[in-house]
Image (tube, coloured by chain):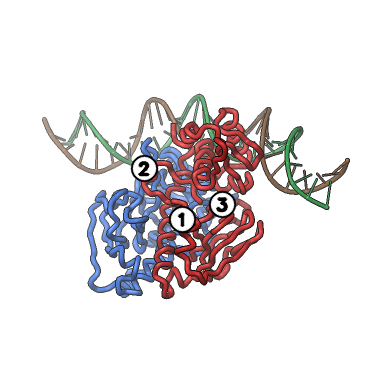
Chain colours: A red, B blue, C brown, D green
Amino acid sequence: MYVTLPNAATDTHRPTPVVMLRSSVPAARSVRRLAAGAHVFREGDAASYIYEVQTGTLRLTRVLENGRRQVIAFALPGDIVGFPNGDLHHTDCDAIGPCEVILHRREALENGEGNPETHRRLLAAALREISAMQDHFMMLARKSATEKVASFLMVLFERTGIREGGISMIELYMKRADIADFLGLTIETVSRTFTQLRNSGIISLHSAQTVIVLDEDRLADASEAA
Amino acid sequence: MYVTLPNAATDTHRPTPVVMLRSSVPAARSVRRLAAGAHVFREGDAASYIYEVQTGTLRLTRVLENGRRQVIAFALPGDIVGFPNGDLHHTDCDAIGPCEVILHRREALENGEGNPETHRRLLAAALREISAMQDHFMMLARKSATEKVASFLMVLFERTGIREGGISMIELYMKRADIADFLGLTIETVSRTFTQLRNSGIISLHSAQTVIVLDEDRLADASEAA
DNA sequence: CGTAAGATTGAATGGCCTCAAGGACAGTGG
DNA sequence: CCACTGTCCTTGAGGCCATTCAATCTTACG
């Protein structure tokens, strides 16, 4: 998942309904269940598979020797991760919570392996990935802390938000540290920004992990530039 | 071109020698010459072609309605740009100086169009692009102004630097504003950082566009964290 | 209840930005 | 040849936002 721009010309992630997934994936597909915290692959691992998230959330990270870390993306249901560069994976990937992922052999992307439809889907996912990352550049380079956090919540709400009895809520499966490393901020700044959005009456925090969206319009405003 | 990390596990851009390009591109390829400032494509244009830079430098940009701009990448000889998302281009692309680009039909990436070798090359370029952009995230999110500018000069030197009579130099075809929008800084900060590197004796400025690298080791040090 | 991990809040610093002015340089026309 | 002009680059002063360092609060869990 990337925090894209509201006005982006490309609709990067129309969330793929599970039903659609079922029909477009060969019956004999390989599915793996992952416990919370389980790693899918590590930087330097041989890239044998590409992974399609069915349920749960994956986290892609990169680390520098000096400890600085960057969360590249959160992969939500419908997202595809693990595109290789050469023969190796170039990020770490682990499950934030319990997950189900579909495994695609790398060859399915490279030559279709006899299934043109899968080939097309994987290639399209790779190209969509490029576009989404370009949008994400804007975030990291040009947005303020408030804009970043608000954008983050907007995207998360659009993709995994729940409306229930007139209440709009978001479950944050990731920790503050993950959000900070994803947005290029510190934990403290993320926390302060949540507090600020709360004091503004835009959101409410049922718990640290559960966000209630009180005013979607003002959240959208906060995610854009002044 | 992305400013990647020195310690990145992926060698994203082994500069492809022109000779190699020649041999791997079909003889009947389509080449286009571009004048300085000419645009290759604009956001929203139909993506009919993918472009491989042979000579010169291309600039990929994205703009927000409020004027904030992000330079996504500089494309140097050997780089491939214009990967579509859906049927459209999602960035602007123009030539910074006179350029020669090779045109590949979009179908060559999508189905090989009867040439498996070209298909393989384009797909590999797309995957390399993903990896390079992930590295670039580190830059935008986690590096200081000095580290950004030093990294930028390092990459540019590795890819287009000239050693001549014991002198190492870099031609900057792009303006300060382009560098700033690429690194997520302001023009003033980029200029000040150049001055600071000059005062440190790490570089020297023959002109605003010509950088002499006096101390490669210290430039490398400046590009990494403390 | 005690411990540990995560989240929040406070105070102070600093790095980058903003606003503003001046300098370098090429192109143009008198 | 030389002002004139526009563009780009540099430099300065001041302010703000995010960070850093540090302490407290919350929550989960044995």
- Quadrant where the N terminus of chain B sits is bottom left
Same chain assignment for discs 1 and 3? no
Is B5 or A97 nearer to us in this picture?
A97
State the CA–CA distance, disc 1 to disc 3. 13 Å
- In the image, residue B71 lies at what x, y percent? 39, 47
Q: State the separation of the CA atoms marked 3 and 2.
A: 24 Å
Left or right: where A223 falls relative to A71: left
Q: Residues within 10 Å of mark 1 (few under 14, many from 20)?
A: many
Residue assigned mark 3: A71
Viewed as shown, does residue D6 lie left or right of B119?
left
Closer to us: A75 or A131? A75
Q: Residues within 10 Å of mark 3 (few under 14, many from 20)?
A: many
Subunit ID for the residue under disc 2: B
Q: Amino acid at mark 3?
A: Val
Q: Earlier in the sequence, mark 1 or mark 2?
A: 2
According to the picture, the residue beneath numbered tag 1 turns out to be B133
Q: Chain of mark 1?
A: B
Which residue sits furthest front?
A165
What amino acid is found at the position of numbered circle 1 in the picture?
Answer: Met
Q: Amino acid at mark 2?
A: Val
- As displayed, is residue A164 above or below residue A57? above
- Residue B197: x percent and y percent? 48, 46
Tag 1 near tag 3, CB within 8 Å? no
Residue D5's place in the image compared with A163, above or below, is above
Could you tell me if the residues under marks 1 and 2 are in contact, i.e. CB atoms within 8 Å? Answer: no
Q: Residue drawn at (31%, 51%), measured in percent from left and top?
A: B93
**Residue C7 percent location from the top left of the image:** 66, 40
Q: Which residue lies under the disc numbered 2?
A: B63
**SS at circle 1:** helix
* Percent x, y of residue B168: 41, 58
Q: Can see residue B175?
A: yes
Are the residues at dot 3 and dot 2 in contact (C-beta closer than 8 Å)?
Answer: no
